[in-house]
Image: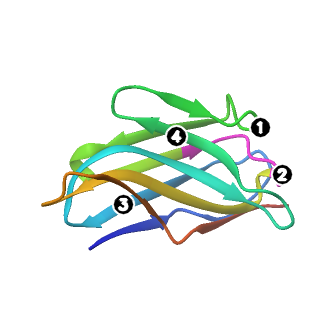
Amino acid sequence: QVHLVESGGGLVQPGGSLRLSCAASGSVSGIHGMGWYRQAPAKQRELVAETTNDGNTNYGDSVKGRVSISIVNTENSGYLQMTNLNPEDTAVYYCFADLVRAGDYSLRTFWGQGTQVTVSS
């Protein structure tokens, strides 16, 4: 069984920074890629950032230049560093990981439980 555990969300003032973490626990053989989507009330889910171990990285248009994503394979973890946050960044952030479970040869996608980010003064 594999679980993704997110942390790092919270309340931050406009202009502030946050770092979200996403850790894969359980029988993980290897991570191919990780990323985050976010969803604000009454809005569609949107991509924040995604990256793969072979260097393909995409950022959502609304966050380009303000976020950076990374994977630490030795930790089975991913990190999303966000800077210069504004109220429009308020949303629930969901991480996902494309990974291979131990004893399995298929790439599967797992999702975290979501973490709330609120940007407000």
Q: Calculate the distance from the C-alpha at mark 3 to the C-alpha at mark 1.
A: 25 Å
Q: Which residue is mark 4?
A: 50
Cβ–Cβ under 8 Å for marks 4 and 3: no
Q: Answer with mark 1 or mark 4, whichever residue precedes in sequence.
A: 4
Q: Which SS class for mark 4?
A: strand
Q: Nearer the viewer, mark 1 or mark 2?
A: 1
Q: Which residue is mark 2?
A: 88
Q: Nearer the viewer, mark 4 or mark 3?
A: 4
Cβ–Cβ under 8 Å for marks 1 and 2: yes
In the image, taking residue 7 as reference, residue 38 lies left or right, namely right
Q: Which residue is mark 1?
A: 62
Q: Which SS class for mark 3?
A: strand
Q: Which SS class for mark 1?
A: loop
Q: Amino acid at mark 4?
A: Glu
Numbered circle sitting on residue 2 = none
Q: Which residue is mark 3?
A: 23
| Classed neighbour count for the residue bearing mark 1: other residues with Cα under 10 Å, few (<14), some (14–19), many (≥20) | few
